[in-house]
Amino acid sequence: DSGVTQTPKHLITATGQRVTLRCSPRSGDLSVYWYQQSLDQGLQFLIQYYNGEERAKGNILERFSAQQFPDLHSELNLSSLELGDSALYFCASNPKPGTSGSRNTGELFFGEGSRLTVL
Amino acid sequence: EDQVTQSPEALRLQEGESSSLNCSYTVSGLRGLFWYRQDPGKGPEFLFTLYSAGEEKEKERLKATLTKKESFLHITAPKPEDSATYLCAVQALGNAGNMLTFGGGTRLMVKP
């Protein structure tokens, strides 16, 4: 158990719909990362938040948005869903460098993912 | 653009048959190279960080090594429980935030 919690685990919806994926980072971690994993694209970085502020953006579509709340949980909103959005969506967190024995911010703790199926 | 290529895509081994997984990378400046293990239906689990050419890290039957262009994950006398997908990722210097660029992974199957 990584300590990162994601809900829901599975989600089936139709094209054109909107869904929200939720993530609670490990206790004490300030950063939250969202990654998308599909069969043809592998694991792709979407977006990072640190203590409520957006820190970095990857290949995130304009139809997707995210935010991190004051209690540090994060939500990823996916709208106008298309068949190609079907994928596993992972959330990850990590401790601040120098804390909890971590030297580098690339050492991520991933949740178990939310599997999205768009029909 | 940072790129990571892993080979082979899939590898079948007999229990006890040692082998190596390859990760080739191109990055503007390497801050760190990471190895993760991913079991089916689970999120990736961190294994190693390597920072500079010549560095090696070991954990049980796994040893990771790094050169200026590639990294290897050596598996010595594997057991069935080592079956998983192994992911390699790089973090570049000067990246906004701490994003990782992942390779496509190597799916390892160890038969008893």
Image (tube, coloured by chain):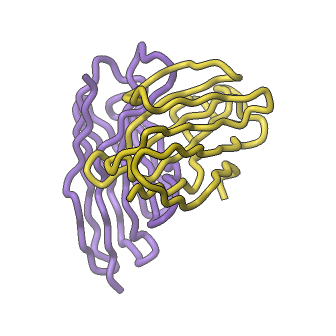
Chain colours: A yellow, B purple
Name the quadrant of the N terminus of chain B: top left
Query: Please, which residue is most extreme toward the top here?
Result: B94
Measuring from the top left, give residue B8's x and y in whole percent.
19, 57
Q: Nearer the viewer, residue A57 or B4?
A: A57
Q: Quadrant of residue B51?
A: top left
Q: Nearer the viewer, residue B56 or B7?
A: B7
Q: Nearer the viewer, residue A30 or A104?
A: A30
Name the quadrant of the C terminus of chain B: bottom left
Q: Nearer the viewer, residue B63 or B49?
A: B49
Q: Is residue B106 left or right of residue A19?
A: left
Q: Quadrant of residue B21?
A: bottom left
Q: Is residue A74 left or right of residue B77?
A: right
Q: Is residue B70 left or right of residue B60?
A: left
Residue at point 74%, 32% (across, down): A72
Q: Is residue A50 left or right of residue B57?
A: right
Q: Is residue A67 visible?
A: yes
Residue at point 69%, 22% (across, down): A52
Measuring from the top left, give residue A1's x and y in whole percent.
66, 59
Tell me: residue B40, above or below residue A103.
below
Query: Please, which residue is most extreme toward the left here?
Result: B8
Residue at point 22%, 42% (across, down): B5
Measuring from the top left, give residue B36's x and y in whole percent.
45, 50
